[in-house]
C-alpha cells in the first residue's frame, strides 16, 4: 500500500519560534499534497493544497505568510509554522495524492504541535 | 459550495450489533466521491470505504457498507457486528472533481462500542 510519513510526530516549541513539519510519500510520487489542521474534538480543516513545483493554494482565512508550504519534490512537502503562538497548537495532518493511483488520498499519521 | 453534514456527535452501540452513522452532503459537482474514515485516539486517519457518485451499487468493504442514496444526498456508513476496537471518531468526506480535488470533512461522529 501507499505510505505517507510525517516528521516529527510531535513537537513542543516556544512562542515566537518557527517549526517545520515534513510530509513524505514513501513509495509513490505525490503530485498533490494537502495540509489539514485539526483542533481537539473537531474535524479536519483543509489549510492548503500544494502541487509539486508550484505555489500552494491556501484556503480562505489561512495566512500564507504564517503557514509556509513548500512542495519541492514529488515525495516531499513541508509546512513551516512561522512565529508560532499558543493558538497555533493543533494536530497537523498531511495527505498525498498520486496521479497514477486514481482518486485515493493517503494520509500521514499527523504531527501534534504544542506552542508554549 | 460543497458541504458535509454529520448530525450525530456521538453514538453508542452494543458489541456485535450493527450501527448506522449518518452523513448528508451537498455539492454542485456532477461527479464526486464519498469517503468514510476512522480516526482512533492515536490520530491517524484510516480509510474505510469509498463510493463514487456514478457507482450503481453500494460500496462494501468487509463489515463496512455504505448506504448511498443519491437523490437524498446521503451516504450513511453501516458497521455490522460491532467490535470494541471500532470505538473511534468516524468522518464522512467528499471530494468533487473541480476545485483542485479538495476533500472536505464532516464534523465527525464518535462511536462508543459497549461490551
Image (tube, rainbow, N blue to C red):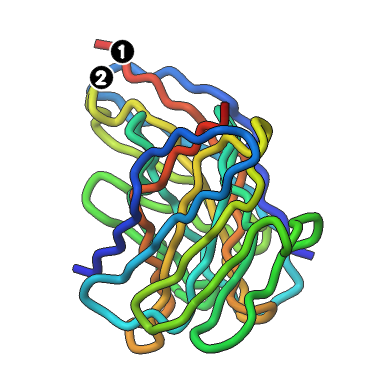
Q: Chain of mark 2?
A: B
Q: Earlier in the sequence, mark 1 or mark 2?
A: 2
Q: Secondary structure at mark 1?
A: strand
Q: Is residue A55 above or below residue B66?
A: below
Left or right of A61? Residue A101 is: left
Q: Are marks 1 and 2 in contact (CB under 8 Å)?
A: yes
Specify the label residue B114 is tagged with. Answer: 1
The residue shown at (32%, 33%) is B42
Measuring from the top left, give residue B73's x and y in whole percent. Answer: 66, 57
Query: Is residue B47 in view?
Result: no
Measuring from the top left, give residue A24's x and y in whole percent. Answer: 33, 67
Q: Rounded to the nearest whole Å, what is the CA distance between mark 1 and mark 2?
A: 6 Å
Q: Is residue B8 above or below residue A22?
A: above
- Residue most extreme to the top: B115
The residue shown at (48%, 27%) is B110
The residue shown at (50%, 35%) is A13
Measuring from the top left, give residue B84's x and y in whole percent. Answer: 24, 22
Q: In which quadrant will I find the C terminus of chain B?
A: top left
In this figure, which residue is indicated by the disc labeled 2? B15
**Do the residues at pointers 1 and 2 share their chain?**
yes
Q: Quadrant of residue A4?
A: bottom left
Query: Is residue B10 in view?
Result: yes
Left or right of B90? Residue B28 is: right
Amino acid at each position: 500500500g501507499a505510505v505517507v510519513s510525517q516528521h516529527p510526530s510531535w513537537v513542543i516549541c516556544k512562542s515566537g519560534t518557527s517549526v517545520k513539519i515534513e510530509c513524505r510519500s514513501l513509495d509513490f510520487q505525490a503530485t498533490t499534497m494537502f495540509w489539514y489542521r485539526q483542533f481537539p474534538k473537531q474535524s479536519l480543516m483543509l489549510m492548503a493544497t500544494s502541487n509539486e513545483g508550484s505555489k500552494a493554494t491556501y484556503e480562505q482565512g489561512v495566512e500564507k505568510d504564517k503557514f509556509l508550504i513548500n512542495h519541492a519534490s514529488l515525495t516531499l512537502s513541508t509546512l513551516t509554522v512561522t512565529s508560532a503562538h499558543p493558538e497555533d497548537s493543533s494536530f497537523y495532518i498531511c495527505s498525498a495524492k498520486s496521479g497514477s493511483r486514481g482518486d485515493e488520498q493517503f494520509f500521514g499519521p499527523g504531527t501534534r504541535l504544542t506552542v508554549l | 459550495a460543497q458541504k458535509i453534514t454529520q448530525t450525530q456527535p456521538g453514538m453508542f452501540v452494543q458489541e456485535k450489533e450493527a450501527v448506522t452513522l449518518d452523513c448528508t452532503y451537498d455539492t454542485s459537482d456532477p461527479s464526486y466521491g464519498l469517503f468514510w474514515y476512522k480516526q482512533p485516539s492515536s490520530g491517524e486517519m484510516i480509510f474505510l470505504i469509498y463510493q463514487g457518485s456514478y457507482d450503481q451499487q453500494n460500496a462494501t468493504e468487509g463489515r463496512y457498507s455504505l448506504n448511498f442514496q443519491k437523490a437524498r444526498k446521503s451516504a450513511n456508513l453501516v458497521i455490522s457486528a460491532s467490535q470494541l476496537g471500532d470505538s473511534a471518531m468516524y468522518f464522512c468526506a467528499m471530494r468533487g472533481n473541480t476545485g483542485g480535488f479538495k476533500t472536505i470533512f464532516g464534523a465527525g461522529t464518535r462511536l462508543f462500542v459497549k461490551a
